[in-house]
Amino acid sequence: MIVSLKKVAKRYTRGKETVEVLHSLDLGIEQGDFVALMGPSGSGKTTLLNLIGGLDRPSEGEVVVAGEHIDRLSGAALARWRARNVGFVFQFYNLMPMLSAQGNVELPLLLTKLSAAQRRKNAQTALTVVGLADRARHKPSELSGGQQQRVAIARALVADPTLLVCDEPTGDLDRKTADEILGLLQTLNRDYGKTIVMVTHDPKAAEFAKRQLHMDKGTLVPGNMP
Ligand SMILES: Nc1ncnc2c1ncn2[C@@H]1O[C@H](COP(=O)(O)OP(=O)(O)OP(=O)(O)O)[C@@H](O)[C@H]1O
Ligand SMILES: [Mg+2]
């Protein structure tokens, strides 16, 4: 099991009001799986994804990812754990506009002990995997949406994480480009062994995954494999 959540709750407090966004949620994901997480807006998909990726912590319960009890790590230890274990892909790419594709992909490696030459080489490899070796010097504004998302995927891959978490990675792309990106994710899952958890609203996108989970009002809908 690469992801194991037990009795996880997440609450947000706003002034006097407390909102429970996830309730007593159990989830297991095997290494090598490709999971599509679906459900209505506000059902807690992003909240769950952020707990799995260690961007946030649960209010209650246990989150074990890649063998680590990440609910017990300090902030600094959690950041180091994330850098080694998880790649993030978001709907709006979140690339640095002043940096080239190459520079963007090298960014996560600045936190490592790799030499500049090794960083350059690893970024080139990641850009090759996503089919953008010939665009390495382009800035994000000189790339199409689909190409920008490929750069973001290369950045997510460059530190060779076991787990990729993607929050609506094709939400801003047309059908054809979306299918190309989803095909790339499938390749990363099949041929590179990456475990992928992807939030999507798009049933066609979800079909690229190996299985689908549905959320509603902060829990996984029964009938899902826990
Ligand atoms: N930082 C926060 N503080 C307070 N409430 C929050 C916070 N983050 C999320 N929420 C609330 O938690 C609920 C779930 O939000 P979440 O972003 O996980 O939904 P989602 O399923 O990803 O929705 P969408 O499909 O619109 O992206 C929402 O009601 C939201 O208002
Ligand atoms: Mg969301």
Image (cartoon, rainbow, N blue to C red):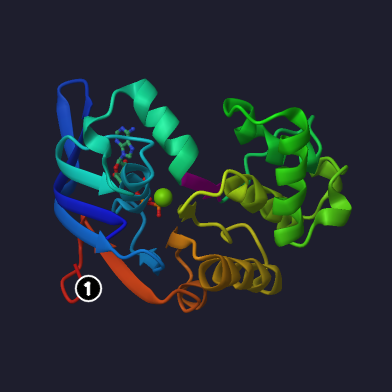
The residue drawn where x is 21% and y is 31% is: 72
Q: x%, y% of residue 3?
A: 29, 55
Give amino acid for label 1: Asn
- Residue at the spot x=36%, y=39% of the render? 54
Residue at figure coordinates x 50%, y 49% from the top left:
161
Q: Quadrant of residue 73?
A: top left
Image: 117 above or below 203: above
Indicate the position of residue 139 as horizontal and vertical percent values. Answer: 83, 40
- Please say whether residue 212 is one of the residues in the magenta stretch: no
- Between 189 and 165, the residue placed more toward the observer is 189
Q: Residue 94: x percent and y percent? A: 62, 39
**Left or right of residue 196, residue 19 in this image:** left
Is residue 199 in view from this perspective?
no
Which residue: 36% across, 26% down?
A: 77
Q: Which residue is mark 1?
A: 224
Label 1, residues with CA under 10 Å away: few <14, some 14-19, many ≥20: few
Q: Which residues are magenta?
A: 86-90
Q: Is the residue 146 above or below the residue 224 in the image?
A: above
Q: Is residue 87 magenta?
A: yes
> Which quarter shows the C terminus?
bottom left
